[in-house]
Image (cartoon, grey):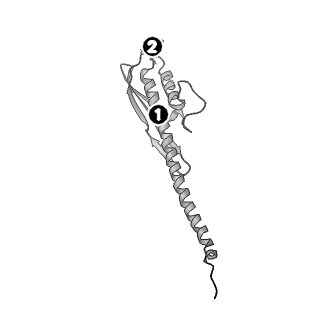
Amino acid sequence: MRRHNHRRNQGGNSLAEFGVCLGLLWMLFAGVYQFGYAFYTYNKLQMNVSNAAMYASMTVYDASQPSQFTDTIKNMVMYGTATAGRRPVVPNLTPSNIEIIMNPIAGLPTVVTIRIKDYQIASIFAKYMLKDKPRVTTLYIGQVTCSSC
């Protein structure tokens, strides 16, 4: 009588099962990484926009130099500081992506809105487009001066 060795015949099956499982697990981990990276990037943007809005609501506004005010706020969003830095907090963020809207009454700001106009989060496998997100609106309670008046 001949004995059949079944273990030798199953060697290819375990290799195929390993390949299928590894591919599925890799796709699962890659999807979790991609979602996590996009969420992390959006969270950093939201935090910087919120901090910039808080700073904008309390800083001195010079009516003769409104561009200096907006440039400082854009630096707060991009670099996390009032002065320009070397590297933005999130990749590919430019000053043109940041919009600052002030609701002036009689030339004085009353409400400051900061939003990211068009920004694309580039993950490994997909790109997420943020239109007008994140966005923060706050009352202006700072001091208004006029250096050239």
The residues bearing labels 1 and 2 have C-alpha atoms spaced at a distance of 31 Å
For the residue marked with disc 1, what is the amino acid?
Answer: Met
Mark 1 secondary-structure assignment: helix
Q: Residues at badges 1 and 2 in contact (C-beta under 8 Å)?
A: no
* Quadrant of the snapshot with the C terminus: top left
Q: Residue at label 1? A: 47
SS at mark 2?
Answer: loop
Front residue (pair 22, 117): 22
Which disc, if any, is residue 147?
Answer: none
Q: Would residue 87 be visible to someone looking at this image?
A: yes
The residue labelled by disc 2 is: 146
- Circle nearer the viewer, 1 or 2: 1
**Which part of the image, by quadrant, shows the N terminus?**
bottom right
Q: Give amino acid for label 2.
A: Cys
Give coordinates of residue 38: x percent, y percent. Answer: 50, 44
Q: From the viewer's perspective, is residue 8 above or below residue 148?
A: below
Q: Earlier in the sequence, mark 1 or mark 2?
A: 1
Position of 104 with respect to 81 (left or right) is left
Q: Which x, y percent locates residue 78?
A: 53, 32
**Few, some or many C-alpha atoms within 10 Å of disc 2 (few <14, some 14-19, many ≥20)?**
few
Furthest residue in direction top, as rendered: 149
